Image (tube, rainbow, N blue to C red):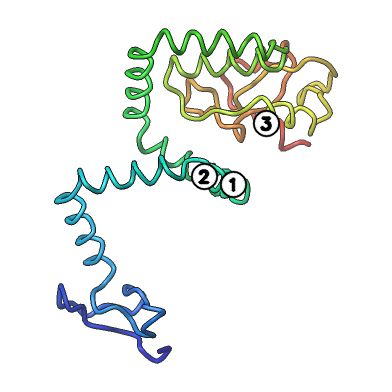
């Protein structure tokens, strides 16, 4: 098996590297068709049987909703960085589409969303950290800035630097500063965030300064 380096696809008739073929473990040999041809066949089969396939998937989901949800939680927990990277790349490549879908859903479910937000605020009273994070997120949505971060990520970042301003070193309540400002194409991912006091944040204005380099 290991001596095979190339193989001719029975579908497209092209000679390709062996890595372009799936290995059939039960039959102990490589598939006769290359990966691309098999994928194209799957796509064609789906297009021709889209309705029936979606019905089967929906039925399976309804019958196994809890087990699938648990499996998804386990996967995310064990692959948190991989999942985060995937979502970041997907959002970057589909930002306009995702924003439009989000707006469309909100327009169709505005009463439901209002109730959900009201109920959530009752059970989750705002802390200063949450308030700053949510206000920043709202501002970034208005200008369609890429990225977001959680309250925990912001608190962990502040704790990492001892809740001190990275410029002047003062201890206290920190403000969210974008190292590369949003107005200059910066993102809203936590990797572009640094904690500064209100005064240093105002002085930095729209300059690109990474105070983390000195820490």
Q: In which quarter of the image is the C terminus?
A: top right
Whether tag 2 and tag 1 are in contact, CB under 8 A, the answer is yes
- Any mark on residue 153, and which? 3
Label 1's element? helix
At horizontal 18% and vertical 56% (from top left) the residue drawn is 45
> Is residue 152 or residue 112 the one in the foreground?
112
User: Number of marks in the image?
Assistant: 3
Q: Where is residue 3 in the image (x, y as percent from the top left)?
A: 40, 92
Decide: is 162 above or below 74. Answer: above
Disc 2 target residue: 85
Q: Mark 1 points at which residue?
A: 81
Horizontal side of 152 relative to 111 (left or right) equals right
Marked residue nearer the N-terminal end (3 or 1): 1
Task: Name the quadrant containing residue 16.
Answer: bottom left
Disc assigned to residue 215: none
- Looking at the rendered structure, the secondary structure element under dot 3 is helix
Q: Where is residue 128 in the image (x, y as percent from the top left)?
A: 72, 12
Q: Say few, some or many: other residues with alpha carbon within 10 Å of mark 1 (under 14 / 14 to 19 / 20 or more).
A: few
């Amino acid at each position: 098996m290991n001596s095979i380096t190339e193989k001719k696809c029975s579908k497209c008739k092209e000679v390709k590297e062996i890595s372009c073929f799936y290995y059939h473990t039960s039959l102990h040999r490589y598939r006769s068709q290359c990966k691309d041809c098999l994928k194209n066949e799957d796509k064609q089969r789906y297009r021709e049987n889209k309705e029936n396939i979606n019905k089967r998937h929906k039925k399976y989901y309804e019958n196994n909703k809890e087990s699938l949800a648990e499996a998804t939680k386990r996967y995310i927990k064990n692959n948190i960085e991989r999942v985060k990277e995937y979502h970041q790349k997907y959002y970057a490549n589909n930002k306009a589409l995702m924003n439009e879908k989000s707006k469309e859903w909100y327009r169709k479910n505005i009463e439901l969303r209002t109730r959900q937000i009201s109920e959530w605020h009752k059970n989750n009273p705002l802390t200063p950290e949450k308030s700053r994070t949510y206000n920043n997120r709202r501002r970034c949505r208005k200008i369609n800035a890429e990225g977001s971060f959680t309250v925990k990520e912001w608190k962990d970042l502040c704790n990492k630097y001892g809740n001190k301003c990275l410029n002047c070193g003062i201890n206290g309540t920190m403000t969210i500063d974008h190292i590369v400002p949003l107005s200059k194409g910066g993102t809203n991912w936590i990797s572009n965030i640094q904690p500064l006091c209100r005064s240093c944040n105002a002085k930095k204005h729209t300059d690109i300064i990474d105070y983390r380099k000195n820490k």
